[in-house]
């Protein structure tokens, strides 16, 4: 369950007209905090990010899966979006099993080094033109 503060931050981002990925970033940030606090762990940084995105979708952020996602990821995203609309109740048994499994995982997935290498490897997969475009957009929309 996302924290009240995270939901408020995401709603504020939406009101300000920011993109769904920016809104979802709040949930990813919360997930990293949870791992750092020791609430649970994650096998990899990628898994920690995926958990945050899933939470965002279930909280109602209109975030479609990326075009080059695997079929499984796209299906999971559809499931999360459907769950947000229906407001289905979580199974206590399944929730407990997930929590126990995550508690057994390591905490290094949220370290600065792990996040940094994840960001670098994700950037390497993008074209130079794509990186340049987003840098120009960021510069244009930066608060002065």
Image (cartoon, grey):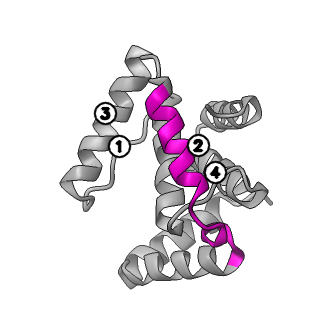
Is 106 included in the stretch rendered in magenta?
yes
Tell me what residue is drawn at x 43 percent, y 24 percent.
Answer: 84
Q: Main secondary structure of the magenta part?
A: helix
Please name the residue that numbered disc 1 is placed on. Answer: 64
Q: Secondary structure at mark 2?
A: helix
Magenta residues? 93-112
Looking at the image, tell me whether mark 3 or mark 1 is earlier in sequence order: 1
Q: CA distance from mark 3 to mark 2?
A: 19 Å
- Residue positioned most to the left: 71
Secondary structure beneath label 1: loop
6 or 11: nearer the eye?
6
Foreground residue, 49 or 26?
A: 49
Observer-nearest of 141 and 23:
23
Disc 3 to disc 1, C-alpha distance: 11 Å
Quadrant that contains the N terminus: top right
**Looking at the picture, does residue 55 appear above or below residue 33?**
above
Residues at discs 3 and 1 in contact (Cβ within 8 Å): no
Q: Which mark is residue 25?
A: none
Residue 4 x %, y %? 74, 28
Q: CA distance from mark 4 to mark 2?
A: 14 Å
Q: Residues within 10 Å of mark 4 (few under 14, many from 20)?
A: many
**Residue 79: mark:** 3
Q: Is residue 37 left or right of residue 63?
A: right
Question: Which residue carries the number 2 mark?
Answer: 23
Left or right placement of residue 37 versus residue 24 in this view? right
């Amino acid at each position: 369950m996302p924290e009240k503060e995270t939901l408020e931050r995401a709603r504020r981002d939406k009101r300000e007209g920011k993109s769904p990925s920016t809104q979802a970033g709040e949930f990813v940030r919360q997930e990293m905090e949870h791992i750092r606090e020791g609430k649970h762990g994650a096998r990899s940084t990628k898994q920690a990010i995926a958990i945050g995105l899933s939470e965002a979708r279930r909280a109602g952020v209109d975030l479609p899966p990326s075009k080059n996602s695997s079929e499984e990821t796209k299906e999971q995203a559809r499931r999360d979006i459907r769950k947000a609309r229906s407001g289905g109740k979580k199974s206590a048994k399944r929730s407990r099993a997930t929590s126990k499994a995550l508690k057994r995982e390591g905490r290094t997935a949220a370290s600065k080094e792990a996040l940094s290498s994840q960001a670098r490897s994700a950037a390497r997969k993008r074209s130079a033109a794509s990186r340049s475009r987003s840098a120009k957009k960021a510069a244009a929309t930066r608060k002065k």
